[in-house]
Image: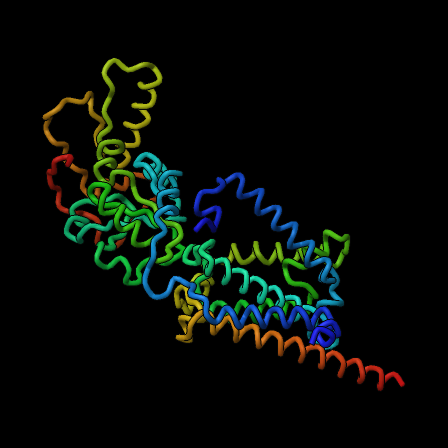
Amino acid sequence: MSAPFYKLGAFGDEASLIVAFLVGIGFGFALERAGFGSAKKLVSQFYLNDLAVFKVMFTAIVTAMLGVTYLSWTGFLDLGLVYLVPTYWVAQVVGGLVLGVGFVVGGYCPGTSLVSTATGKLDGLLFVVGFAAGTLGFALAFPLVKGLYTAGDLGTRTLPEALGIPHGILVFTVVVVAVLGFAGATWVEKKMADRAAAATE
Amino acid sequence: MIRWFSGLTLNQKLGLLALALGAVAIFARVGPGQTITLNAKELLTSVQRQEDHVTASELAAWVIEGRADYRLVDIREPKAYAEYHIPTAENVPLATLLDGALGRTDKIVLYGDGGIHAAQAWTVLKARGYTHVYTLLEGLDAWKEEVLFPVMPRSPSPEEQARFERAAQVAKSFGGQPRASASPGAEPMPLPTQAAAPAVAAPTLPAGAAGGPKKKREGC
């Protein structure tokens, strides 16, 4: 077991900031190359014209999941040390809905708005200002919404635990769902393109 | 077969690769499972980086500043808690620590009489995924030595003198009493009553905590 690197002392606090910076640059670069610096591309997702967001995100999930599984299986990574965000299901359902509405209205999610700003788009910059103001507002209103913040606490849960199935079976199931999802997404995109072509004739 | 494969698009090939890796992963044995596992190295690294404790003087400063971003938790029995506790502390006895009074993301400072029980509780909480847990270094013993009854060093340098005067002020605000010099076998100092303790600006005591019986206790 030699990972996670930070928790096992491979580097210290200051170095961890540099690592985080490099990972962040890589993440931003990947998002930009996927076309996610454009609100048009992102919002096409919701009109089913272009399901790139779905495909990219699911690809990332499958890649990370397979990587973590194999690294853990070969004894390189101690999965027990990987930080899991605790499940606060009520808080997360409410937060998801708020984020979703913001995404449809504003055309970005927080990460992609930064990517968009970095490529010089003003709508992205406005979005960043908006979400900074929202974050500040949330912090100021925190005493009022404190109860919601931790509502529905289920602790740290993983799908294999919650569903009572072995880790490996779950991994395979997610891969199958993803591959079927990609095929389905491509089919939907083609359908929508055909419809759009018929409408313009 | 090869011709069929080379006829596929890159996306289809990647999909096949994912399916193959996923199928092999069915046999993978991973995951922490149901039992709690402690990673000794991670815990020791955290201890060695001094990320596991706060000192009595640091805690005193937090209480005086009225900081509210942490929870001070007295893990002793309710009786001991009623006799004396550090202002702003709440009582969560050791045995009930995991019963839901504490949140996993709360910043928690644990203390007991000495340092050992708190350190054991720290280990259990860390193993259960509580992210920001600290102990008060040497527990109430250090609180008494450093904060309530600080000792004037023999023939102090001006710097030590100034430090002692600051400590004496802090001690008085917590109802303690600075001592002239360390003398082994001296009379035990009486602990402040809870009514006397919160003579500082911000801290408020949990309901029912005030006015504990004044009791002489050896500085342990």
The picture places residue A6, in percent across and down from the top left corner, at 48, 46
The image quarter in which residue B2 lies:
bottom right
Residue sitting at x 80%, y 85%: A195
The picture places residue A112, in percent across and down from the top left corner, at 67, 59
**Of the pair A140 and A176, the residue shown nearer to us:** A176
Looking at the rendered image, the quarter that the N terminus of chain B falls into is: bottom right
The image quarter in which residue B14 lies:
bottom right
Where is B104 relative to A92, above or below?
A: above
Where is A62 relative to B201, above or below?
A: below
**Of the pair A28 and A173, the residue shown nearer to us:** A173
Residue sitting at x 57%, y 76%: A176
Residue sitting at x 25%, y 55%: B92
Where is A171 relative to B185, above or below?
A: below
**Of the pair A170 and B10, the residue shown nearer to us:** B10
The picture places residue A147, in percent across and down from the top left corner, at 42, 64
Q: Tell me: B96 left or right of A200.
A: left
